[in-house]
Amino acid sequence: MVSTMTETAATSTEVMDRVVAGICTALESVLEREVSDLGPQTKLSDVGLDSTGVLELLMQLEETLGVEFDAENLEMSHFESVGSLAQFVTAEMAA
């Protein structure tokens, strides 16, 4: 039982890491510039992401990560930081 829980935690961490990396890559593409020190704590507003950029970012994430977002599930709080967006994307992938 412990082995299964450890494997599940490792898998969850791997998925989250992959999602964070995908968000960082897509964010730099949308902003058309390299952003230093991107990580889960990075606030999206601090890197210059606006409402148009949010839409572009979501489209790129759908393509890159193979997930479709339901607009009814989107909330502004999901776009507070790379980490909050990663949690939302990960939950959408699991749904």
Image: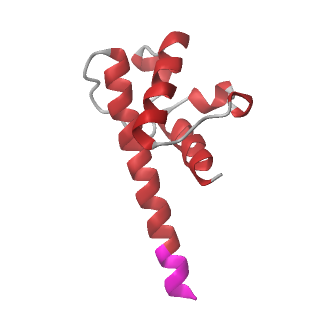
Q: Quadrant of the N terminus?
A: bottom right
Q: Main secondary structure of the magenta part?
A: helix
Q: Extreme right residue here?
A: 72
Classify residue 55 as left or right of residue 31.
right
Quadrant location of residue 48? top left
Residue located at (46% from left, 24% from top): 57
Residue located at (29% from left, 24% from top): 35
Classify residue 59 as left or right of residue 76.
left
32 to 61, vertically: above or below: above
Residue 38 is situated, as x and y percent measured from the top left of the image, at 34, 33
Quadrant location of residue 29? top left
58 to 83, vertically: above or below: above
**Can residue 81 be found in the magenta stretch?**
no
Relative depth, front residue between 82 and 60? 60
Magenta residue span: 1-7
Residue 91 is situated, as x and y percent measured from the top left of the image, at 61, 49
Q: How is the image coloured?
A: secondary structure
Residue 5 is situated, as x and y percent measured from the top left of the image, at 55, 78
Residue 66 is situated, as x and y percent measured from the top left of the image, at 47, 42
Quadrant location of residue 78? top right
**Can residue 4 be found in the magenta stretch?**
yes
The count of marks equals 0
Residue located at (55% from left, 12% from top): 51
